[in-house]
Image (cartoon, coloured by chain):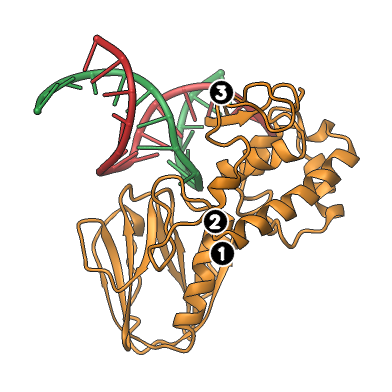
Chain colours: A orange, B red, C green
Amino acid sequence: MPELPEVETIVRALAVQLRGLVIESAQYWPSRVFRGVMPPELDGTQVKEVRRHGKYVLVELDRGYLAIHLGMTGKLLFDVPHNQYTRAQWHFKGIRLGLEDIRQFGRVIWAEQMPEELRKLGPDPLEISVDEFVIRARSHRTGIKSLLLTQTFVRGIGNIYADELLFRAKVHPNRSSAELPKHVLRRMWKEMTTLLEEAISHGGSSISDYVNTAGRQGSFQKEHRVYGKAGEPCGNCGSPIQKTVLAQRGTHYCPVCQKL
DNA sequence: AGTATGACCTGATGGC
DNA sequence: TGCCATCAGGTCATAC
């Protein structure tokens, strides 16, 4: 569910509330999110910082790192009662952070050092330079949407923002990455930056179940131009937005504005 | 290296 | 109301 803007929204709230707090106790309910490895005893450990790394929430402790991926249906919520989907709870003085995840596609990783799963990811889309973006994109032949979804290429873009970005940049989702002209890739980089920053400023997109740590929805779904708009007229040219399957994902685009 | 497919999970929705 | 198929913000493993 959550992509870069949603995770960024969550992380900003978590950082404010958790920085400096000490874990008093933690509870874990066995589920797929732990992949068979529960975090060790962390009582007495202090939260140094909370950062985003791609789609991961990275909680930097004074001893080790807790990395949380929210998958499709993961939520981090303060002070809500335990329910059947609660996978973990961390108790701090005066506040309790719970992880809920219906589908269990999320993941909790603990490691003494920055976890390998995070280190192997590509650069952040809001930090990569335009030149590096162009060079990296040109070194792959695969379809551009598939590449945008590949977290080792850039980290944090998912299905919504891939579709929205390609529409804004007027690029067909199945165009071969290596064959995109440099000026088109530069345009994509620019649109990527503005799209993600706009989405963050709206608190992310809420389609069905995304909510921030306060249980509130984002509003960027109101600004979507193609995602979830199949059959509706394109805002540029009026022709109907198409929906197909590409890279195993529902893909929305304007067949007139985004030519192959 | 690429891509296509299925798997992993559960719930919501729509057709019959 | 019930049953079935399909779809959903994401990875991951396996097979061509």
> How many other residues sit within 10 Å of disc 3, few (<14), some (14-19) or many (≥20)?
some
Q: Nearer the viewer, residue A136 or A36?
A: A136
User: Which numbered disc flags the more N-terminal residue, 1 or 3?
Assistant: 1
Residue A53: x and y, percent?
A: 58, 64
Residue ID for mark 3? A231
Q: Amino acid at mark 3?
A: Gly
- On the same chain: label 1 and label 2? yes
Residue ID for mark 1? A8
Rendered position, B14 above or below A139: above
Q: Amino acid at mark 1?
A: Glu
Chain assignment, label 3: A
Residue A61: x and y, percent?
A: 48, 82
- On the same chain: label 1 and label 3? yes
* Element class at badge 2: loop
Residue ID for mark 2? A204
Whether residue A247 appears in this view of the structure is no
